[in-house]
Amino acid sequence: MAAQTLQQPSFLLANLKADSTTKPLLQRCQDLVKIIDEYPAKELHLIFPWLVESVFGSLDGILTGWNLRLLHSRNNEYNIAMEFLNPSGPMMKLVYKLQAEEYKYEIPVNYLPGPVKASIQEGVLPDCPLFHNKLQFPLSGLLTLNLALNPFEFFMFNFAYCLITPKSYPPGQHGSSTDSAYFVLVDTYLKYFLPSEGSVPPSPFSDSRGSVTAASPRSSSVSFAGYGVHSPSLLKHHIFHQPSVNADPSAQEIWRSETLLQMFVEIWLHHYSLEMYQKLQSPQVKLALLQYRLSMSSMPCQPHAPPGSGTLHTYQVLLPFHSPPPLWGLLEEPFTPTEEHVLVVRLLVKHLHAFSNSLKPEQLSSSPSAHSHTHTSPLEEFKRVVVQRFVQQKLYLFLQHCFGHWPLDASFRAVLETWLSYIQPWRYTGEKSNPQPDQNRAVPDKWESFVQENLLIYTKLFQVFLNRAVRTDLVNVKNALMVFRVAKVFAQPNLAEMIQKGEQLFLEPEHVLHHRQPRGYLTPGQGGSYLSSRQRVVTDMVFRVKSHVYALEGQDCQYKQMFGTELRGAVMKLMQIIAQARQTAKRISDHSNEVAANNSFLSWFGLGSSDLNNTFSGAEPEESGECLKKTHEFLDRALENLCQIFKLNQGQLTQLLSNLCSSEDDGNCKQLPDCIQGENGLILTDLGRRQIINGLRRFDIEYRGDPELQPIRSYENALLVRLFYRISSLVNERFGEHMNSLCSRPDFLGRLSRHYFTDCNSTTKLKQSPSSQHTLDRNRRPRLSLRPLASYRTMLLLLLFYMFGALLSLGPVSSTVLILAAGFLYGLFMTVFGDKLKTH
């Protein structure tokens, strides 16, 4: 998709397309290395779009390319692909060679993420500078807009888009492995273009003026300020080509780093719902309002302005630029990230923390406002703002979407760890000298400003996680581990106090700020300045927290305190469910131990308990033994950490557990779950659902089908079951009427016949679950059932009996006669005394 210029047919491109179907990957890469070295940029320009598509696949997902997401180190082609796509490899050499000539390549706007596409098609430029001055306006209208990207941007766009392109994997393969070629390449590119140590290696090519075309040039006086601010309208910004950066070598140092990060963030994280898009439709209005209020509150001697005087003026200036109505159909397609997608995002988060934390201490100690570009390199300045200005908002929306839409299963662990990685930047400082264990290591005070500027990512997502946790089966060890992980992270010393202080700053009344007495101060490393007074520092802290919350949730957000009464009640509810799950796990473990102790190796023959209903529905098949012990341990420690976070004393926890133990006794498991009577039968309540999930109660399940057609058990011989079924079917078909007449007799012979022939009229009725309310009891005709003879237990008993007869010098026939006689006598005994035994 090169820029629309008339080109002569490329014989080189035709030859490469022909070789792609006949030659192996190694030979094709060797040919490409020679072509990249020998051919001029004019020829390479024609093959570049095809080559990128052949490697990463087409944007519509029809062509799979090299399948980097399925290429693992055990594959023969893995090393070939990694060497070719290395940041210093042939492919990147081709990119730089074309970059020096300022070629452009087009990407349809339709392939951009939903919010970006909607914003552009409404006539509003997105806040990311990556899309500025790159739009191509064809004659056919706005709906066929294209982005004109330079070679590096085009390469990185296709590389990033490869992750979210729907792929049809072969059976038995999936793309969630962290050792795939794609995952390793992402890690390699991040380390190369966002280095924690040193600087980004320069490009090996330059244009005739001695510089490379930068992706998003900016003057030194702007310094990232354009990021996060909308441009008024597309109609006022339709410059087609980017200017070259040939006079500012400092800007050249990091333009590739900015481009790579912006491309990753926009393609991987810029997805959210239509409702959220409408809420964030005009973020510059909120920004201007906050700047106005901040300037008003930061002037102690200024008289009070009338309420709303500055706000009205701000909206009157900015709203006319955003008058077009939203396009309602643009964001209707659902966005469902895969586990592989989330794992790559977590890799990005971890690397950005390490990249930002590698900032030199002398640069970290200076305030951004007093920062001088003559003493700080652009890379150091980039490290200072990379997390807050480039990642924070979109990652928050991405995580919020995943928390709300991810299935309630163990795969949520990837999303959870991504969240926990972001809110713990102190884990990626590179310091290994602290010998304290993680649970006893206090969060350093220097991270207080980070907690305040990311308050919603701590508090709002914690509340959403609580809503997920109460609906999750916590008897499952994987789900119990996730609850323990969250409680452990938030229980780190000093973290809860930082969050609570951030909430107090956000809830600080604005009209009080002008009359505050000086209290407290921050060092410049915590966000303050030596030029600011104590009152100014507190004011700046307040509005820093408020600006963060308003930027992510809007001016009209209703903030719920993490340490408020409402959330405290939700935490107590979760702790009660955790206690119930602990009790269920212990009961399942004890039951499993009893079964294991009672059943010897003879259980293989069916001598152990064969009651399939004598199990607890709260546990999965693998939830036994060590898994249940780990579940109990995780839930115990989660309770301790939650008590530590929310300052609950041991007496409250003991009372909660004692109340639970008194209400949940052993007989409680045999009761039905909590239900209400509806028109069509019983309807489960929320309490009943939680009781079933945690294995506290269950419905009595009874098989309602033909007993002869039940699934073959593990203690039965499959061949004999099928053989005896055919024999009994023939007998029942031929003598069924006679058996029915015998069983219908009211005398002693009828009772004896009903004992030997299957008669289901005497079944006991159980309380039915809602799904079986309309099931009708069918009168089955008496029949002969030989299926018990196919049981390994029966065969073993017969074998022992024949062996015992052989010891007594009894032949097989005599032993058989004795067995039949014993069976007949047992039938007579049960017929005569059976009813009396049942009454007792």
Image: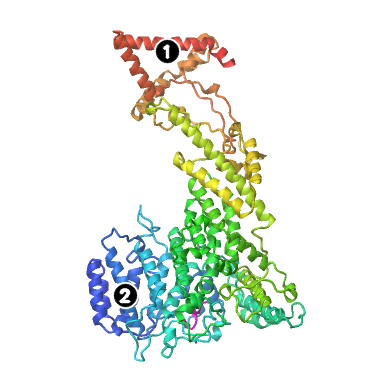
Q: Residues within 10 Å of mark 1 (few under 14, many from 20)?
A: few
Given residues 568 and 34, the one toward you in this image is: 568
**Residue 296 among those drawn in magenta:** no
> In the rendering, at what x and y percent does residue 368 appear?
55, 79
Name above or below for residue 581 compared with residue 557.
Answer: above
The residues colored magenta run 128-135
Name above or below for residue 765 compared with residue 523.
Answer: above
Element type where label 1 sits in the image: helix
Please report whichever mark, 1 or 2, sits nearer to the chain's N-terminal start. Answer: 2
Given residues 170 and 330, the one toward you in this image is: 170
Q: Looking at the image, what colour scheme do you see?
A: rainbow
> In the rendering, at what x and y percent does residue 837 appear?
55, 14
Q: Which dot, 1 or 2, sits closer to the camera? A: 2
Q: Which quadrant holds the C terminus?
A: top right
Image-based side of 152 in relation to 31, left or right: right
**Tag shown at residue 467:** none
Q: Residue at x 49, y 10 (%)?
A: 829
Q: How many marks?
A: 2
Q: Residue at x 50, y 81 (%)?
A: 132
Q: Quadrant of residue 157?
A: bottom left
Residue for badge 1: 823
Residue for badge 2: 88
Q: Residues within 10 Å of mark 2 (few under 14, many from 20)?
A: some
Q: Which quadrant holds the N terminus?
A: bottom left
Kind of residue at badge 2: Ser
Q: Is residue 405 visible?
A: yes
Q: Quadrant of residue 721?
A: top left
**Residue 132 among those drawn in magenta:** yes
